Amino acid sequence: MGKRIFEVYLAKEGVPNNEAYAKLDLPASPWELWDALDKVRLNEGEQLYMEIDDYYAFEYLAPHLEELDISLNELNDLAARLATLDEVQGIAFEGLFSMEVQRKVNANGGVITLQDLRDLAVSAKTDCYHVVDAADDAQLGRFYAENGFIPELDGISDGVFEMLDFAGIGRMMRHSENGVFVGSLYVLRDGKLTTAPPCAKDLPEKPGYLFRLTLGLHPDIGDACTVTLDLPAAEAELLDAQEQLGAEGWEGVTVIDYDGIIPYAADFTDLPMELEEFNAFTKAARDIPKSEVPKLKALLEQFEVQDIETALFLTEHLADYVLTPDLSSPQETAIDHLRFMADDHSAELLLSHVNLYAYGCDLIKEDNATLSPYGLLHRADYQPMLSPMQETQKMEMKMK
């Protein structure tokens, strides 16, 4: 729901025939990060490959971030800090960054570190800098001259004032201050940078909540009061959230933020108007084994579920489907089948003589399966995978 800072591509590092991957906008919520790892499906000993596909408004960071050994959690932390900057603070960050790059260059080629970037992001929210409305040296020089920053100009006539070399004055001041232009503004640092707290390389543990909503009143209705509501919740907790907001029912209440073990769930629910129904879905999701959650996510995406009723139906019929997370491509499907049909030695001999892609595609088609973002998905009875609505229509046709 917030600003997008980076888009990353995640996959396994150097695993032949594997096509498991995830694309993720940062900053991401805790459950969005873990959902991405559900899609990548790292096994013990495998390494995560990460590439930044899009820098959005921060393209100028690309040459520097590409050189850093940075983890997903560290990049997400940086993105979260950058996402909180307002327009002026964002300009200040770019200016402070440019000054830091120049300082490193002057110090014989020092490189910008991740800690440097995090410190600059934190400092952009402090008063260690000034931003001046000046797009070039001439405008900067006139600003300094008109606002009494150059005592030598006190008392001169208007005629002489207009004859001054404002560009020269601005250039002199900029060089002495080590300031920089960012777009149509000038950024000057005049205080110490703030050190950002340390950030772990590894992702934190999975959240203790399954679903979390941050609720508030619509800006036209009430103040900036917010309430955090973890789901599933008891009826008393739902009423308490309304009371804290000063609302009767969910009319006028808006969802400010959402995080959940099933990120896709926010897309098929009219929150908060359907919160009671969504709460029932979260109870059903809570009660299924954790190992079945990727299967539910795969089904919700496969059938492009757009309503809670269908989502609830799928939670009750998970046993009708089989998800194999280890299979991410036709090639892996073919290899898995060959190893099932023959002993390991024979299978290895066959591999180099088989068009694995074509064979895998045929196997997937034969089983009425599909390669979902979470693994190979098919019905337990190998019948065609119809959406719950299609299944209902099929039954109705049989009854006629």
Image (cartoon, rainbow, N blue to C red):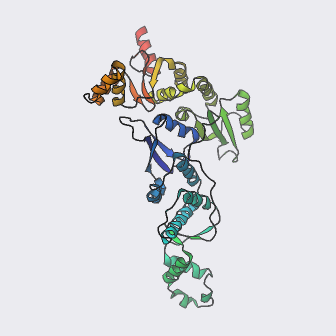
Q: Residue 304's x, y, as percent? A: 46, 30
Residue 400 higher or lower than 94, as above or below: above
Q: Nearer the viewer, residue 65 or 209?
A: 65
Residue at (55, 35) in percent of width and height? 266
Task: Say whether residue 184 is visible.
Answer: no
Q: Residue 242's x, y, as percent? A: 71, 36
Residue found at the far top of this picture: 399
Q: Residue 382, located in which quarter of the rendered image?
A: top left
Task: Say whether residue 237 is visible.
Answer: yes
Q: Residue 298's x, y, as percent? A: 47, 29
Q: In this view, does 368 lie to the left or right of 72?
A: left
Q: Quadrant of the C terminus?
A: top left
Q: Residue 121's x, y, as percent? A: 58, 58
Q: Which of 369 and 396 is in front in this view?
A: 369
Residue at (46, 20) in percent of width and height? 321
Q: How many labels does the image show?
A: 0
Q: In this view, does 219 lie to the left or right of 347?
A: right
Q: Is residue 336 left or right of residue 198?
A: left
Q: Quadrant of the N terminus?
A: top right
Q: Is residue 66 left or right of residue 203?
A: left
Residue found at the far left of this picture: 353
Q: Nearer the viewer, residue 206 or 248?
A: 206
Residue at (45, 28) in percent of width and height? 325
